[in-house]
Amino acid sequence: MSSNYNPLNFVLVKPAGPDCNLGCTYCFYLEKAELYKNTKKHRMSDEVLEELIKQGVAQSNDYINFTWQGGEPTLMGLDFFKKVIKFQQKYARNKSVANALQTNGVLLNDEWAKFLGQWRFLVGLSLDGPEHIHDKYRFTAGGKPSWEKVMRAHELLKKYNVDTNAMCCVTDYSADYPEELYNFYKSLGLTWMQFIPVVETDKEDPTKAADFSLTPEKYGKFLNKIFDLWLADFDRGEPTTVIRNIESVFHTYVDMPAPECTLLEQCGVYPTVEHNGDVYSCDFFVEDEWRLGNIMQKDRLVDMINSAQQKKFGRMKKDLPPKCHTCEWYKHCYGGCTKDRIKDARDNGNPRFCQSTIDYLKHIDPTMKRLAKQWKQNQLAQNPITYDIYNAGYDF
């Protein structure tokens, strides 16, 4: 097999398509309903679900992760996810299968939480922080605050010992509160945190980013503060919290591929499957140009992620200004996420967070080098330490 042939080990699934019971101001996915105008309600059928799992398991190597996302995947109902387990048991044979669910938590109840704990789903809970931060942009479909509903979901997940990550969308507003966010999640026992920079085009003025979009200046300061808080919480030489970005960057310091696609040299290994079986290059590029095929039309998932079209998509990440390729920090960021170059026309196609990333990497570099040296020494001594480990099943 060719060395540049990508194995299928991760599938991002949108079982309810763009449908959601919230109406968050910054959401980029609700508008994807325009691609499926003939259907008001988008739901994955049992036939598509079974074919998806059948292909995913058969075409993977020893391991595959199904990440169920939205829209809001719990709109499918619990019976749908019971079928997920049934089909996985039917086709898994001796392969390892992991499930992750990214949810706003609004529909979760005891039965849901018990099921998620029983079948070891990793849950990414969309909780943007304390009430004043979360309710700044995350509203119900009727325009009401959602924080209390999400907090109830957190308590249910905790009650049934469900592994849970805090998913925080960082906006221009929340970037002012890194310490409050970090300590809030810690107080809830959410020691796995993922901070996602929000950048979306202004719907009224496409020549600029929307006002809620995170600015480069604020993002760099935010990352630096989060890193300092993470480092201050070390206990006996090891971290007590897990920050996805820090874990991913650490991989680049020990010459391992980052588990986060934004830090890979080339992207395109995380295909997105819509409710009807359509497959796209990435969930940030669910559009006609990057539709790879449909699993119900004799298209194989593994062939689609290795198609010429997908290779072209992956190479876009390298389409950077010359200064990026000669930058001393390039191997630690590879230009970041492709979508962050196209949301604000004023960025002129350049990586929006270039300077903030450089400032961040300069800030953490001495510590990362020290930790990397320690990690390598421990590996040689066969006494591995934990801060390089970020299970692929924990990615969203």
Image (cartoon, rainbow, N blue to C red):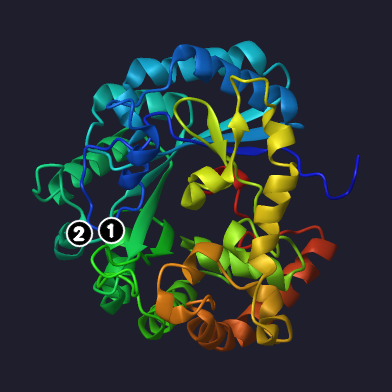
Q: Is 150 displayed left or right of 325 in the figure?
A: left
When the figure is inspected, residue 67 is found, relative to residue 207, above or below; the finding is above
For marks 1 and 2, the one nearer the N-term is 1
Q: Position of residue 302 (x, y in %)?
A: 72, 34
Q: Amino acid at mark 1?
A: Tyr
Residue shown at the point (28%, 21%) measured from the top left: 111
Residue 191 is tagged as none
Per the image, label 1 sits on a secondary structure element best described as: loop
Callout 1–callout 2 Cβ contact below 8 Å: yes
Residue placed under numbered mark 1 in the picture = 26
Q: Position of residue 86 (x, y in %)?
A: 52, 12
Which one is in front, 255 or 290?
A: 290
Q: Amino acid at mark 2?
A: Tyr
The image quarter containing residue 8 is top right
Q: Position of residue 179 (x, y in %)?
A: 31, 75
Per the image, label 2 sits on a secondary structure element best described as: helix
Residue placed under numbered mark 2 in the picture = 137
Spatial CA span between label 1 and label 2: 7 Å
Viewer-side label of 1, 2: 1
Which one is in front, 373 or 312?
A: 312
When the figure is inspected, residue 17 is found, relative to residue 51, above or below; the finding is below
Residue shown at the point (50%, 63%) measured from the top left: 339
